[in-house]
Image: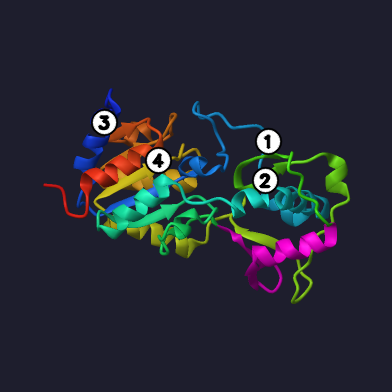
Amino acid sequence: MAEPVIAAEPSAGVEALARLVAGRGVVVLSGAGLSTESGIPDYRGETGSRRRGSPMTYQEFTGSEAARRRYWARSHAGWRTIDRAEPNAGHRAVERLRRSGHVSAVITQNVDGLHRAAGTRDAVELHGGLDRVVCLTCRQLSSRAELDRRLTELNGEFADPGAHRQADGDAVLPDAAVEGFRVAPCARCGGVLKPDVVFFGESVPKPRVERCFDLVAAGQVLLVLGSSLTVMSGLRFVRRAARDGTPVAIVNQGPTRGDELATTRLGLPLGPALSELADLVGDRPWR
């Protein structure tokens, strides 16, 4: 594969990206970096190194009542960061590109629902959504807002405004606060409630993965936005596109595991870069 195009000047880089994606049936693969301008922390800094703290695994959550108490206490404290977040210029630019026909599909690794909030209702949420809760026994889906109300009734005004917020609505809390937290069971059957998201150690549902592969195969360009591609759930789509000869463009502040497969690589802030991209390509195919 040819060396990736990395423009020295931001405007020149976005112009090169515009020539690649305009009118091409672009498939967007977005990650946590797209939501940082909405005030949601990402998993890694610009160096690609993980921020402090380790995410809870599916095995921990399902195997320990204490682990579930810790998860829901921290999540209840941090939920409002997600709930109050608004789509930023990057999400809105992606929706502009979709409406104008340049983007054919959006796959997101994010669980914050901000693509939907920006108008991209058919975005494939690869890892699920934090605004939904599922019972592990009866499989009923319910809203996170309703669970938040129930948790508040059980625990009072528990959320600590001074808690350190982390990715996916997590918050760092003292052990004493976690130990006294009361967890709400499923309102239908009394079973264990879990956010409708894919935990580390849990597999993305196979039909969802297959749908994403189909979208990538049908696209003419894969555009990666704000993802370090550290986990295989996103990197596999980049590898498939590169294997099939589909150009891969990456816009991310910091290195990614897919850089060697990219034909275009830009290290720019996503909001301004994507807004400029949407302005350049406009509502008609590039000429």
The reply to whether callout 1 and callout 2 are in contact (CB within 8 Å) is: yes
Label 3: how many residues lie within 10 Å, few (<14), some (14-19) or many (20+)? few
Q: Amino acid at mark 4?
A: Gly
Can you give x and y, in whole percent of width and height, for residue 206 in the image?
A: 49, 61
The quarter of the displayed image where residue 165 is located: top right
Query: Is 92 left or right of 5, judged from the image as shown?
Result: right
Q: CA distance from mark 4 to mark 2?
A: 24 Å
User: Which mark is first along the chain, 1 or 4?
Assistant: 1
Q: Amino acid at mark 1?
A: Gly
Q: Amino acid at mark 2?
A: Asp
| Quadrant of the drawing holding the N terminus | top left
Q: Residue furthest top?
A: 8
Q: Amino acid at mark 3?
A: Ser
Q: Give 210 or 30, whichever is nearer the viewer.
A: 30
User: Which mark is first along the chain, 2 or 4?
Assistant: 2
Q: Which residue is mark 2?
A: 170
Can you give x and y, in whole percent of width and height, for residue 31 in the image?
A: 47, 45
User: Which mark is first along the chain, 1 or 3?
Assistant: 3
Q: Is label 2 in a helix, a strand or a loop?
A: loop
Q: Which residue is mark 3?
A: 11
Q: Give 150 or 103, whichever is nearer the viewer.
A: 150
Q: Which residue is mark 1?
A: 53
Q: Which residue is mark 4?
A: 271
Q: State which region is magenta.
A: 129-155
Q: Give me the residue at 77% from left, 65% from top.
A: 150
Query: Is 188 left or right of 226, judged from the image as shown?
Result: right
Q: Is residue 209 visible?
A: yes
Q: Give me the residue at 32% from left, 52% from top.
A: 27
